[in-house]
Amino acid sequence: MKFVINTETPEGPLSYHTASPGIALARAKALAETWQQDVTNQDMNGRVYDLDAFDTCFVRSGSADALPSA
């Protein structure tokens, strides 16, 4: 799956592309800290997530906790 990280900087819009949700979240958090602006992550279907929603949906989904123990 591919992701686009978007933010506005004083110089204009800035976007990064990545295939890793973990890297996408880390990049978005770094941009939010650097620019103090809203940062969004967009999936390949065009759905836009704020940082908390993206973290919940793609990085910390909890799906590993739902697996039965061996």
Image: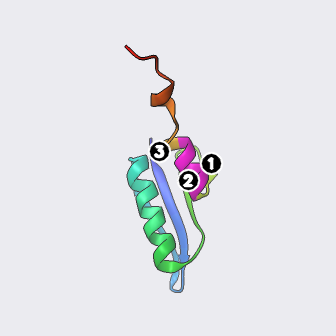
Q: Residue at x 56, y 50 (%)?
A: 54
Q: Which residue is mark 2?
A: 42
Residue 33 in the image: state x and y as whole percent. Answer: 48, 74
Q: Look at the numbered disc 1 and give the secondary structure of its residue.
A: loop
Mark 2: amino acid = Gln
Which quadrant, please, contains the N terminus? top left
Spatial CA distance of label 2 from label 3 is: 14 Å
In what element is the residue under mark 3? helix
Q: Residue at x 50, y 85 (%)?
A: 11
Instruction: Tell me where residue 20 appears, x and y as whole percent.
Output: 38, 47
Q: In the rendered structure, which disc, 2 or 1, sits on the residue that comes first in sequence? A: 2
From the viewer's perspective, is 50 left or right of 3? Answer: right
Tell me which amino acid carries mark 3: Val
Q: Which residue is tagged 1?
A: 47
Marks 2,1: beta carbons within 8 A: yes
Q: Residue 16, percent across and down?
A: 43, 63
Does residue 64 lie above or below 23 as drawn? above
Point out the residue furthest to the top here: 70
| Image: magenta residue range | 51-57
Marked residue nearer the N-terminal end (1 or 3): 1
Q: Residues within 10 Å of mark 2 (few under 14, many from 20)?
A: some
Going by the numbered disc 1, the residue's amino acid type is Arg
- Name the quadrant containing residue 7: bottom right
Q: Residue drawn at (56%, 45%), measured in percent from left and top?
A: 56
Q: Is residue 53 magenta?
A: yes
Asked if the residue under mark 3 is in contact with the one under mark 2, i.e. CB atoms within 8 Å, the reply is no
- Does label 2 or label 3 sit earlier along the sequence? 2
Q: Which mark is residue 59?
A: 3
